Image: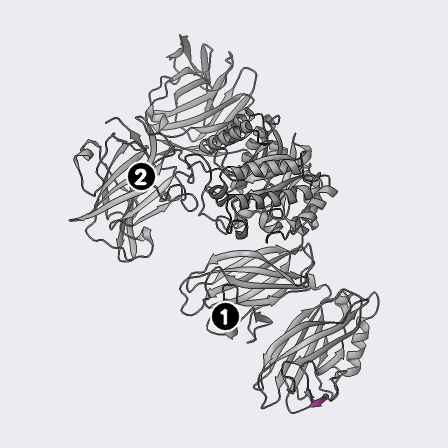
Amino acid sequence: MRTLRALVAAALLCLVPGLPAHAAADLTYDFENGTTQGWGPRGGEVSVTVTQDAAHGGTSSLLTTGRTATWHGASIAAPFVRGTGYTVTAYARLVSGQPAATIALTVQRTPVGGSTTYERVAAATVTDGGWTRLSGNYQFTAESADVQLYAESSDATGAFYLDDIVVTPLGDPTREPVSSDFEDGTAQDWASRAAATLQPSAEAAHGGSRSLAVSGRSASWDGPALNVFGRMAKGDKYALSVWVRLGPEATAGRLGLSIERRTGGTPSYERVVSPKDVPAGEWVQLSGTYTLAYDVDFLSVYVESDTGTFPFYLDDFSMKYVQPKPIQTDIPALKDKVPFVMGSALTRPDALGVHGELLARHFNGVTPGNELKWDATEPREGEFTFADGDFLVDFATRHGMTIRGHTLAWHSQTPDWVFQNADKELLLKRLETHVRTLVTRYKGKIAAWDVVNEVVDENQPDGLRRSKWYEIAGLDFIRTAFRVAHEADPDAKLFINDYNTEFPRKREALYALVKRLKEEGVPIDGVGHQLHLNIEHPPASSVEATIERFATLGVDQQITELDVSVYTDFVSSYDTIPPELLGQQGHRYKELFDVFRRQAANLSSVTVWGESDDVSWLRSWPIPRLNAPLLFDDDLQAKPAYWGVVDPSRLAPSVRRLEAPAGTPTVDGRRDLEWDLLPDSPIARVGEVSAGFQARSSGKGLYVLAEVTDLTAGRDDRVTFTVNGTSYVVKRTGTSYAAKGTGTSYAVERTGTSYAVERTGGPKAAVRPTPTGYRVEALIPTGTDVEVTVTDSAGASTSWTGKVTTAPAVKLTSAPHRTPVLDGAVDRAWSAAPEIRTATWIQGTSGATARVRSLWSGSTLYVLAQVTDPTLSEESPNPWDQDSIEIFVDPGNGKTKGYEDDDGQYRISFSGRITVGGTFDAGGVKDHVKAVTRTVPGGYVVEAAIDLPTITLAPGTLLGFDAQVNDATGTTRTSAVTWNDNTGRSYLDTSHWGVLRLARG
């Protein structure tokens, strides 16, 4: 145990100039030498003495009596050095017979040139029944005089003991890890945000034997919080993790991790981990990273729920500084490798530290992601806040970057007050004030504005989103926003910005709107295409078609929010992203930037929505999951995606995968129905040449199809099919082709407008011209390693390389043109419809099955399912675990690994309960189904009508289609059977559904 002399010496060492703070030892005040060790009274009649009446450790403690005010107590000249962080701990106990009170450790100091301040270090409720631990962190940075550490009590006259006071210099506290395991039986500095009760508990533990039980919460945000002020440095990244579990009697809940920061007393709240589902009885980890981007005077991490006040446990919290890797300076800058502005979205943290360095090196354009939106700039009417916007605009200006303003009018992130009690006149007045204020403030600095954002809804008859803006003001809100923005800054380029413009229906709806507004004289300068894509869909050709379509309007175009998710659906999640997906993503970026470079005359900017994976919004949307959609990884290092943009030769060869369903199409150069059951697998455009490819498997060999786009015919135009190393060449206009490596050849003679095949020992093949090029069909030997190369006479070449595997035939059925009565009865109209049966088991090998028929009329598809199931149950709360029929419909027969907006999963239970699945919340299809059910001996009948407004139904139309029967016993699904899809993933993607062909009556 230290003597007072040793303590004084240690304190003096802390003040020696040049001595590293981390070299100083702990200061411990244990009072075992019988002295107060420098502590004295604070207050006129206060007495501070050493006593052996009580002790936490050893035999002595410090007793404070004679108090007559709450700030009276025991104090010491604080051994704190400016700029050094400290952890301060102490144990307190009340003198016997006194009521519970809050004991606090507080610092008093007087900044040079300022007023005396009082800063709380630690506090806890203390009783006379035992010792209570006080603990907290402290650091001050302003030059100050009269720095004191003192203990005070909320009971103005209460007497109390102090013992084992320890002041620990942290060296650099922002680099020291923070952890809590609650194994000492205390709350370890966690405190309630409001009314919640925090109690160490042995009832549940993630690690060790104890956790912290949280109960008595008054609101979703009420719960445990830990003061981390002084433990984070501005611009640095920290990894935070905590384990949570539902408390007693809580059956469901979602918990997340957040940060509260205050500057000048104004609080702000930021999510570190969005609320996640916490199943009953399971520990769930909440982990994420956070970068402090502000000067603060308060900083706290806390756990909250999205709704409710249910109890929960937390355990094993940790917060660790993340040492950044230096950015790579030996690789080309992105902005130097593209013929347009290369932009990145950013938020305030992204402009600091290595993130700021990466931005400055690789990008010459930026888009503030949130800082210029309405909720950030005008949270209350007339109260504008520009601190964050100014910060990012100044950052970009210093680095010579072009700035896009995002966004002036949007249906999301707009405060409720904007629409409150608003008629059209008032709403447009508020809009004009907001737009004029923002655009005027940044006149000459912001080069382009997203004036209106996401105003198109292709599912509406007029193509316009039914937002509050539209419901109150109609198109006039768009006209007003553009007019005022142009008046405020005539030199700024004004854009309309939207997502999914690469899909034909959305493309045409936006095209029609822009065309109309331009014809009216609305000052629209350009169209922004967001391009939130995934690694497989849609093809790059769809993006190019969109750019070419809008080029006819003479508007500037920009890619505004590009990212490429590694997921093709909204449910899947990886713990570690497979490297082959990152390679595939690299080739996807390569194809996209090939398009952008070809279309550079129509594009002025390409912006990725974030500079690196660690800041991507796709880490929390549509669900919290690991995603890596950008050009640089979590450590800001170049990924295959980066090389796909800068130097595709650095990418590993692309190996794609294609299923060849069983089939025997006629090899005559005509595209028969067999090929139309599936979409072609795209072969990327190079120059003016592109293609689509399919295959079918049979006992005779591998049937292959290539649809080539090449408007200029040449003698050397050809398609080469290479199977397991042997190549088979089909020329477009030549008179022969050879099977390389086999010594066989066969001739192709042109007859009129088609090609006939004369075999001379080679595989059967045929070529036929098309309006945009030519079509090749061939029957070649079966193999798994396949390459399809399309070459034109000028030498341009594009290819598809991958693995081809056999698969069952795609099932096809038809729907006659009839209109049944929707009443659950099998009327005569159904007699014309062919019957299909569910016999593809995806769960179990026996159980309920169905006979299914389809009809169509107008824009409606009718489905009849006669289900054999003698025992019916709806006991499970999960609709998929109830006895039900699921009808899957893809109006475009896209066969995608994910749902498009008009794809639907329509589930109807035996009692008529309807649930709908699809993209996001199935918003585009959830109101499109009606159904009537009827129980019959041995099962039930479902008769459904599904509206398909996104296409025109006609004889010959092909729909992606499937049916699934769920068989329940009690609360459990015991079997499931489909018509065609054998993957068990019908609810996630449409790629293995069967096909329904609409027929005449």
Q: Is residue 767 left or right of residue 90?
A: left
Q: Is residue 48 magenta?
A: yes
Which of discs 1 and 2 lies nearer the camera? The answer is 2
Please identify the residue farthest to the right as the structure is shown. Answer: 17
Q: Amino acid at mark 2?
A: Ile
Identify the residue shown where x is 55% and y is 45%: 628
Instruction: Magenta stretch: give its range.
Output: 47-51
Dot 2: element: strand
Question: Which secondary structure is most common in the magenta stretch?
Answer: strand
Answer with the quarter of the image where residue 247 lies.
bottom left
Badge 2 density bin: few <14, some 14–19, many ≥20, Cα 10 Å: many
Q: Which label belongs to residue 214?
A: 1
Q: Find disc 2 in the rendering and name its residue.
A: 946
Q: Is residue 498 magenta?
A: no
User: Disc 1 or 2, which lies upstream in sequence?
Assistant: 1
Dot 1: element: strand
Measuring from the top left, give residue 362's x and y in whole percent.
68, 39
Q: Which label belongs to residue 926?
A: none
Answer with the quarter of the image where residue 252 lies.
bottom left
Front residue (pair 36, 558): 558
Measuring from the top left, give residue 808's x and y in whole percent.
33, 34
Residue 841 visible to the viewer: yes
Please identify the residue farthest to the top as the structure is shown. Answer: 752
Measuring from the top left, give residue 663's x and y in whole percent.
32, 28
Q: Are marks 1 and 2 in contact (CB under 8 Å)?
A: no
Give the quadrant of the C terminus. Answer: top left
Q: Amino acid at mark 1?
A: Val
The CA distance from mark 1 to mark 2 is: 48 Å
Badge 1 density bin: few <14, some 14–19, many ≥20, Cα 10 Å: many
Residue 562 visible to the viewer: no
